[in-house]
Image (cartoon, rainbow, N blue to C red):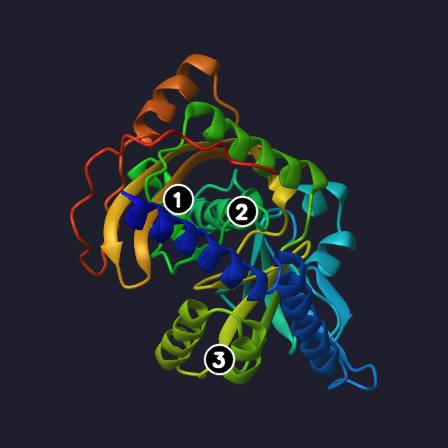
Amino acid sequence: MASRTVCRVFQRRFASAVAAQRPSLAEVRSQRNAVFSREQARQRALYPRIEKIEVSMQGPGLDGALLVMNKGMSTPLSCARHLTEHHVTNSALALVDGEPWPLHQPLTHSCSLTLLTFKDNDPTLVNEVYWRSCAALLGQVLETAFKDDYTVELLSTRDVPVLSGAFCCDVVLDPQLDSWTPSEESLRSLTRGAQQLIHQDLAWEPLEVAPSVALEAFSHSRCKQEEVEQKASQNPKGTVMLYRCGDHVLLSGGPLVARTGLCSQYEVTALHSLGQGSWGLHRRAQGLSLPLQLQAHHTVWRKLRQRAEKLVDVPGPEVAAPPSPPNSPQLPASH
């Protein structure tokens, strides 16, 4: 009995010593932001003098409209500001020469430009990007939910179709939380965190970078460094896409919508255990959301939420079966 007590005391002291050596969340975020800002400034400096490009606007009532913009400086959002307030507030994504293009990404050549909204005749692409953006927002909330008390490692999560019923964000929490099962209040706390970010109407700033830049940005995360190398190897250009939302820098496998304020109804619905994986106990956080332009009656929302609570099957590497429900007390998510 005495030996077990000594062992537990030693484990607590060891965990405290490791935590003391670990940089704080604020320090990690500051370092990532510094790398992002430095690279963003370097790329902008590639266009030392103003060169003009022609942007041919496509879409209802816009065909034939020609805008003269600044190469490497003007973005699709800049173009929207030359049109109407409706285009500024409702555009979520752009097509540049038919290819998806984030609204805040500078234009680098003369092109055709289409602004996409959630009420287009075919909103499939916008909905897919919105779902990915909601998952990115969930990851941002999870990273800060436990402050510096516990570590949080955001894993690479494959995109899931909107028809799956929930967007997903895979995560590994501090091993000290392996026995934790979140309560409804914990999920509500995460939801409040997301709603605060939505209320701030933060831009998702894109930045395409070389792997070396992303590796420096994520120098504190072996998991993210592996993800950087994987994404770079899958991209014909050998680059990866970073996004910044407030002070949160993330990797993304595809474009995100323009800003958090495009989200409206948003709720974190579940946090499922997936079993032991390469980084520890893998969990899948799930949520449900509708964009600002689309609202659901509370009875419909309740049915959608019930569906979003069920574990979404994401194709990918197999993990162990979920562990048996723990008997340890629940811990509230903190802010």
Distance from Cα at disc 1 to Cα at disc 3: 35 Å
Question: Who's the residue at 61% across and 57% down the image?
Answer: 25
The mark lying in front, picked from 1 and 3, is 1
1 or 3: tag closer to the N-terminus: 1
Q: Is residue 255 left or right of residue 106?
A: left
Whether tag 1 and tag 3 are in contact, CB under 8 A, the answer is no
The residue that appears at 45% across and 59% down in the rendered structure is 14
Q: Amino acid at mark 3?
A: Thr
x and y percentages locating residue 82 in the rendered image: 78, 55
In primary-sequence order, the first of circles 3 and 2 is 2
Q: Which residue is mark 2?
A: 137
The local secondary structure at tag 1 comes to helix
Dot label at residue 282: none
Residue where numbered disc 3 is placed? 239
* 243 relative position to 230: left or right: right
Disc number for residue 177: 1
Instruction: Specify whether 71 is left or right of 96.
Output: right
Label 2 and label 1: CA atoms lie apart by 22 Å
Q: Quadrant of the C terminus?
A: top right
Q: Nearer the viewer, residue 20 or 181?
A: 20
Label 2 packing within 10 angstroms: few (<14), some (14-19), many (20+): many
